[in-house]
Image (tube, grey):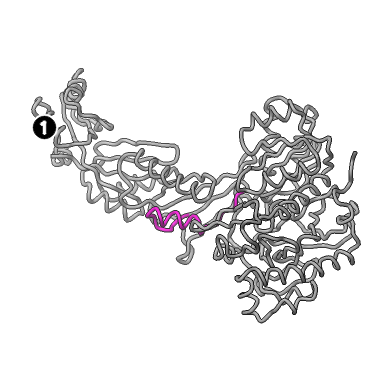
Amino acid sequence: MAVRQISIFAENTKGKLDLITSSIAQAGVDIRAMSVADTQDFGIFRLIVTEPEKAKEALESSGCFVSITEVVGVSMPDVPGSLAKVVRILANNNINVDYMYAFITVSKKNASVVLRVADNEEAERVLTENGVTLLEEKDIANM
Amino acid sequence: MQKKYFQPEMETMPVEEIKKIQDEKLVKQVRYVYENVKYYRDLMDEKGVSPDDIKGTDDLYKLPFVKKDDLREAYPYGLLATDIRNCVRIQSTSGTTGKRVVAFYTQNDVDMWEDCCARAIVAAGGTEGDVCQVCYGYGLFTGGAGLHGGSHRVGCLTLPMSSGNTDRQIQFMMDLNSTILCCTPSYAAYIGETLREKGYKPEDNKLKAGIFGAEPWTEEMRRDIEKTLGIKAYDIYGLTELSGPGVAFECEAQTGMHINEDHFLAEVINPETGEVLPIGSKGELVFTSLDKEAFPLLRYRTRDICVLSREKCSCGRTFLKMTKPLGRSDDMMIIRGVNVFPSQIEAVLLNSGYEANYQIIVDRVNNTDTFDINVEMKQDDFTDIPGAITKKEKELQNAMKAMLGINPKIHLVTPKSIERSEGKAVRVIDKRKRLGINV
């Protein structure tokens, strides 16, 4: 069920960001969600893309350092209180969120977020039990 | 009373007499070493030289060289020339792969060393009325102990500050009216900057002189420090292997450092061939101790490149002068006064499971050496969490600190991203060269 996220190590050097984005562009891969974790010396680019394998290959062939992590994708009605409900479910079940970020919205009806937790299966279980819609990779490709 | 020399009978002795003393002492020292140190005996036997072949300094060239590797190989007792019970002190410098260079001292050795430092302090205008603030590190490093002992010998009031804690340094300097400052030149510059930031003018302190060594610096830095602190700045040179600071020291002429020739015999050689070069040539400095008891050294290769000169000095001292080191004939770096070899860094990386793909970047910013090491990340170390990477960097930094004694800043970088020229990485980028510093 989990969604694959690609993480790219980005040193704080000239042209690094350009190299990352142009590699993905040339591979013809679409970015669906994006977040950057930054420190003083480096950043980690996290992306949800239409074709993770293809993106990884393209990035690696241009010298980027890439790793793949599984994360939880959640879809919810784009109305006030939806995210609060999801977060409350996780909190009530003692599930810690390492980080989260939103999808680039294409639908007006639904909003989607990425959740990074320690135990994907556990998070997916409690969210499903509480009626939250999870995203699958095929949903992302079709967004 | 203002004295011009600490030991005038030695420091101003006619050159012919110095040579005579050196001849006599060398003959004795070589015999002493041959009889008491198996390591040397083997080296000399191997070269087919016996103590009988050494009749004076003109025969020095016959002796084998000793290198830092020999000292490490003989660690810890292999070069000790006397019973350990006759020794009263050790000092040490860092070495590679966990092996340090440990130097032993008898009381006579300590006395000789402290006399040499006292000569340096008196040459800088020191008297018993002075307050001498020693902010070289105390401990295994020779900087603190050497100048501390020298200051006692001169009769100065000695402030054993050790390094660091600049606010406290300044408080003591101002409240106790320090007149002589002993530290690395970069720390002197840093103290000067801090004083200025605190609103002090050069005339607000009582300092008159500084004795600065243990790292490369420039004439430009000297003028800056002199202006900021309102002092005259003197250079000092030494090696733990020989004793510590005070092997050579600068006088008021500020045109090179007088070598304490009654204790240390200097030569300059071609580092490639080992050939002895005439005085005035640029080459690698080689020292022979003349009267050491615990840890004598014959023809020790310092790896420092310099030029010797025998020109008459306006200060009246007759001792040979050496230039500041003009570079190194090996890959040693001096960072914040500490000797660092790339091989030490390699050893830490391999021990910590990294490949030896790294790049050292040294610079000097605001008068302090910066020390960065780029290391290629292990495949498994990279995840989506930045904290996991900074934790690995911190671990590696701690391991480096344990080996080197100073803290580098570690940067984990993308695998295979470190430049390679013809398959071999450029290991060291020393940007201090842009400041004209001989590294």
Question: Is A106 displayed left or right of B291 in the figure?
Answer: left
Q: Point out residue B26 in the picture as x, y percentages from the top left corner.
A: 77, 68
Q: Point out residue B409 in the picture as x, y percentages from the top left corner.
A: 49, 44
Viewer-side residue, B408 vs B101: B101
Outermost residue, bottom side:
B48
Magenta stretch contains residue B350: yes
- Residue at image coords 86%, 55%: B11
User: Is residue A109 visible in the rendered structure shown here?
Assistant: no
Please report, as a chain letter, where disc 1 is located.
Answer: A
Q: Which residue is mark 1?
A: A125
- Residue at image coords 85%, 50%: B253
Viewer-side residue, A27 vs A89: A89
Under tag 1, what secondary structure? helix
- Residue at image coords 63%, 56%: B85
Tell how many labels: 1
Q: Which residues are magenta?
A: B338-358
- Residue B237's place in the image compared with A122, above or below, is below
**Quadrant of the frame with the C terminus of chain B:** bottom right
- Residue B33's place in the image compared with B369, above or below, is below
